[in-house]
Image: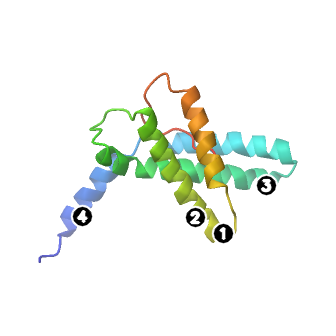
Amino acid sequence: MRLPRISDIKSDVNLYLDTIPKNTAKVAAINFLVLSVISTAITGHLLTGLIRGSIAATATLIQGAVTPIFSKLFDRNGKPFTYFQDLIRSSAAVVITAAVTRTFGFRINIIQNIAFNALLLSLTSNRPVDGAKPVFV
């Protein structure tokens, strides 16, 4: 068995990075700001708001990062995800985010967050989802 060449690995990584939605960072930044403000307003604690905003931005970035995997899994070839495919993609982002936040001592309710994201998807499901979208946790 021959080891892969560095150029092959570099090419595969570049191909993967090219398929991550281009608006992922922008959507994550907006999600961070919106959830930070809302959480701070509800709790009255700036630190709590910033933590909630950071977790939401992390979930959005994870969702963008796993998009190429789900594109290949669902054989989308550049076509937008359907409602159920996007629900699965968002659910995976919530579960991975829950695992990441757990290592820092934070707990998020996975079922509640998946249900909330399903509700948001159903309210905006008049068009197929293309690119990154906010994931709320």
Mark 1 in CB contact with mark 2 (< 8 angstroms) = yes
Q: Residue 64 location, x and y as percent?
A: 46, 47
Q: Nearer the viewer, mark 3 or mark 2?
A: 2
Q: Residue at x 46, y 45 (%)?
A: 88
Label 3: few (<14), some or many (≥20) within 10 Å?
some
Q: Which residue is mark 4?
A: 9
Query: Can residue 123 be seen here?
Result: yes
Q: Amino acid at mark 1?
A: Phe
Tell me the quarter of the picture where residue 134 sits.
top right
Residue 56, x across and y down, in percent: 63, 49
Task: Give the residue pinned by disc 1.
Answer: 104
Label whose residue precedes the other's in the sequence (4 or 3):
4
Amino acid type, label 2:
Val
- Residue at label 3? 48
Whole-Å distance between the Cαs marked 2 and 4?
Answer: 26 Å
The location of residue 126, given as percent across then percent down, is 49, 21
Q: Which residue is identified by label 2?
A: 100
Pointer 2 and pointer 4: residues touching (CB < 8 Å)?
Answer: no
Rounded to the nearest angstrom, the CA distance separating label 1 from label 2 is 7 Å
Question: 10 Å neighbourhood of mark 1: few (<14), some, or many (≥20)?
Answer: few
Give the CA separation, mark 1 to mark 3.
14 Å
